[in-house]
Image (cartoon, rainbow, N blue to C red):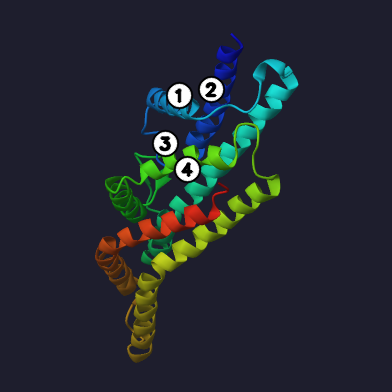
Amino acid sequence: MEIFAGKIFGFIMIMTRVGAFFAAAPIFSWDSIPNRTKVTVAIFMSLFISSTIVCPIDGASLSLIEVIIIMSMEILYGLAMGFIAEFLFASVKLGARFIERQMGLSMANVLNPLSGEQGQPVGMIMEMVFILYFLSINGHHMFLMIISKSYSSFPIGSIPSIGTLTEGVTVAGSTMLLLGLKMSTPILAVFLLIMVALAVMARIAPETNILFLSMPIRIGAGLLMAGLYLPFISNFAQEYAKWVDKLLPI
């Protein structure tokens, strides 16, 4: 009976960490996936992990306060890992937003069917292309390996220090800005050349309405460069895996 109670306690603690990770991680947290599917995947993942590890804590000897503290630690650790993965995943969307602002499409909002949020069309296309490539190389399996590997470094009841988790989330946020800017830099350089050319044209022909002339040029150039850039977005998947391995506290 005690062995059975220990297994139940270990399963609940594993389910807590896995559920917290799925609630914040990309792909698994999206509104396009039914909640019943999310819960089912989390339960099966927890059952698999609980069958491969031994819970180092005797749940029968713990008080209610101690159980709540351990559960809170598991939730905190799972959410921190999920936020790090989500921030790095959002680099594609952020880089596309830099491009859209230069194209003058920052006010063009459409509904993102994946996340259920409002987004810009160019960013949505680039994000979907990256997601399709990411899924085609079984990138979502990496998230399952992350949560499974975390129990090798930090068993049930032990998590990294709060400072380590905070630093990981903070660095992931700054890395998201860096990667987004790095992805959009080639296209931003083209826009810089276009603005220089328009400035020279304004000096040569002052009577030309540069404002109305620049809009179709910027939109057309942006769409052309974004289309040329899409085949190379697959390179970001390798860089994403590298940063996830570097920043996740596992």
Categorize mark 1 by other alpha carbons within 10 Å: few (<14), some (14-19), many (20+). some
Q: Which residue occupies the foreground of this view, 250 or 116? A: 250
User: Which quadrant of the figure has residue 65?
Assistant: top right
Q: Which mark, by number, is residue 47?
A: 1
Relative placement, left or right, of 9 versus 236 is right
Categorize mark 3 by other alpha carbons within 10 Å: few (<14), some (14-19), many (20+). many
Instruction: Name the residue: 52% across, 60% down.
Output: 175
Q: Which secondary structure lies at badge 4?
A: helix
Is residue 57 depicted above or below 227 in this figure? above
Q: Amino acid at mark 1?
A: Leu
Q: CA distance from mark 4 to mark 3?
A: 13 Å
Q: Amino acid at mark 2?
A: Phe
Q: Specify the farthest residue to the top.
A: 1
Is residue 86 depicted above or below 42 in this figure? below
State which tag comes first along the sequence, 4 or 1.
Answer: 1
Q: Which secondary structure lies at badge 1?
A: helix
Res 111 visible: no
Q: Amino acid at mark 4?
A: Ile
State which tag comes first along the sequence, 2 or 3.
Answer: 2
Q: CA distance from mark 4 to mark 2?
A: 18 Å
Is residue 80 depicted above or below 8 in this figure? below
Q: Amino acid at mark 3?
A: Phe
Q: CA distance from mark 3 to mark 1?
A: 18 Å
Instruction: Name the residue: 61% across, 33% down.
Output: 74
Find disc 2 in the rendering and name its residue. 11
Res 196 visible: yes
Q: Are marks 4 and 1 in contact (CB under 8 Å)?
A: no
Please provide percent x and percent y for residue 248.
Answer: 54, 50
Find disc 4 in the rendering and name its residue. 146
Please provide percent x and percent y for residue 176.
Answer: 50, 58
State which tag comes first along the sequence, 3 or 1.
Answer: 3
